[in-house]
Amino acid sequence: MSPMKLPSKVKLVDVGPRDGLQNEKQPVPAEVKIELVHRLQDAGLTEIEVTSFVSPKWVPQMADNAQVMAGIRRQGGVRYSVLTPNMKGFEAAVESRPDEVVVFGAASEAFSQRNINCSIQESIERFAPVVEAARAKNIYVRGAISTAVGCPYEGEVAPERVELVARLMKQIGVQHIGVADTIGVGTPRKVQAAMEAALRHYALDDVSGHFHDTYGQALANTLACLEMGIWQFDTSVAGLGGCPYAKGATGNVATEDVVYLLHGMGVDTGIDLDKLIDAGKYISDFLGRKPNSRAATAILTKRNNEACAVPS
Amino acid sequence: MSPMKLPSKVKLVDVGPRDGLQNEKQPVPAEVKIELVHRLQDAGLTEIEVTSFVSPKWVPQMADNAQVMAGIRRQGGVRYSVLTPNMKGFEAAVESRPDEVVVFGAASEAFSQRNINCSIQESIERFAPVVEAARAKNIYVRGAISTAVGCPYEGEVAPERVELVARLMKQIGVQHIGVADTIGVGTPRKVQAAMEAALRHYALDDVSGHFHDTYGQALANTLACLEMGIWQFDTSVAGLGGCPYAKGATGNVATEDVVYLLHGMGVDTGIDLDKLIDAGKYISDFLGRKPNSRAATAILTKRNNEACAVPS
């Protein structure tokens, strides 16, 4: 058998500060978020989803968006992205000079209705001016397609739905799309089918994967994408971010687990796993829990045992 | 892209009652073990690693081996296997009429020395009469190759070491070998290399994978094996079994997570996932903890939420 064909380099976007912390009930002060971003960039992350410019009524955890953006010591070669669901959010975001804005659409009609209170078509119409304004200002635009393989209301989502949203996003000028298994129900073949649907409208370099580990499938899904040549993924340090549809269950795949997978296969990420684990421990300690990452747990336990073995 | 080529059917061997419970400190009564075996076969498992015939001085948890084997209501089409590390164990095991006996060898010399107190070569010599006696009695012999990709003492283990142990096992008449990532450090390419080494001496139908989820890599490794055509895996219900080298870290991959992966890809296992989750909950409740399985956690949470949503 010839060895597995995989990309030689992978870029990870850490969405922990935004997608992760957004789901946290306890308030996280801006300085903690800023420190987390600093630790992530020190660990070698080259893109960080920092915050969201949405109404604080909807997402109080992100009310400090401008403060967080202003507090970051920006580093060359690192891209700072923010969520901008509408023109009002975009206008506020611009002041913060993001390198990239993210717009969200669902592949499931029911999810779109219940999550953002409009149809898929309407959500695209709402994003269109944001995309236009961003591109006029030379800000890169990423589109996220949520519930790309499964929906808490509709169940399985057909690849044709992803194909449709990808086409609509392409039409309004979105430059990159992320295919997201929001509730973590996907398995490799379904994820590959969703990816192929997206690839009908976007080049391989303009598509990324976003997996949740709710059912433990995120790394298998990542591997399935790598085998297709996909080389960009969203991940969340310490597995920050619960799954709103299954309390107690895991949310975003942990950056640590994905880095362990990639480095173990000789795939370069530019990330220092030890520093990344420290960043995850920093925010987990603040939140008063353990990192939701198996690799981090194993490595922290090993460190601990070694520390205990040192004669005092 | 053509769809992923995978086997259409997979056989899982649940090693929870033996490999899993062996690592438990609290005593588990024989009747609980028997009930667990019954629940596993009711869920559709066709092979169960029931117990170990080792000295109770070394593994007190398995001292009730004969009692457990005698208490099982055997079901047609189900294979009951037991560990027999030496002739003494084998002779005791024979009384219990196992369908299969399992012998263990390490791919790492240091692990062999420290775990079973002899060299790899010596361990093979010790197993040879067990294999001969078993085959004379028409009992199927499986050989497990532990530390096949990594060792807690030696670090990375070269595929050549696996090739050597596979060759030695073949020479003494072992019929099937399991390639085991005992400490869960493997990633897909390394696991594929270890598997290829084993396949130099054994046919595809006579090789299985045994993965630990310590670093979260077990499902990705399973997928990598499936892509090679390997269709037999050891798994452990509820993820029973810690990792003795990293306390607090996960051990055997949960059967539930693997079944979710396989069914999600349309691969048949003959297993009823809901019944399997009940079996895992049964033993986890007894042990006073939650199942160490992300799929089980997500599905149990969902069941719970649905139960709460029913008007009272």
Image: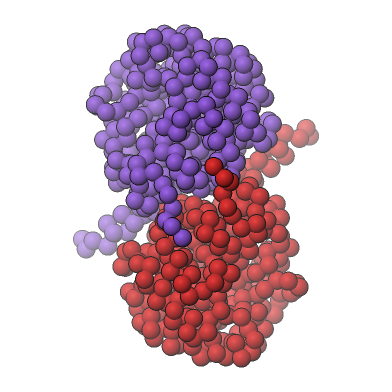
Chain colours: A red, B purple
- Specify whether residue A9 is in view: yes
- Quadrant position of the C terminus of chain A in the picture: top right
Q: Is residue B162 left or right of residue A70?
A: left
In which image quadrant can residue B310 be found? bottom left
Q: Nearer the viewer, residue A118 or A242?
A: A118
- Locate residue B68, reporting x and y percent: 34, 21
Q: Is residue A186 visible?
A: no
Point out residue A302 in the picture as x, y percentages from the top left corner. Answer: 66, 40
Residue at 46% x, 51% y is: A216
Out of B305 and A140, give the one closest to the viewer. Answer: A140
- Point out the image quarter for the N terminus of chain A: top right
Q: Is residue A252 above or below residue A143?
A: above
Camera-side residue of B304 and A297? A297
Instruction: Name the spot of residue B123 as percent of width and height, x first.
Output: 58, 16
Task: Residue A307 in the image: state x and y as whole percent.
Answer: 72, 39
Is A20 located above or below residue A91 in the figure?
Answer: above
Q: Is A252 on the left or on the right of B48, as rendered?
A: right
Q: Residue at x 56, y 60 (%)?
A: A229
For residue B229, side relative to residue A234 (left or right): left
Left or right: where does residue A161 sit relative to residue B306?
right
Name the residue at 26% across, 35% down: B42
Q: Residue at x 68, y 53 (%)?
A: A273
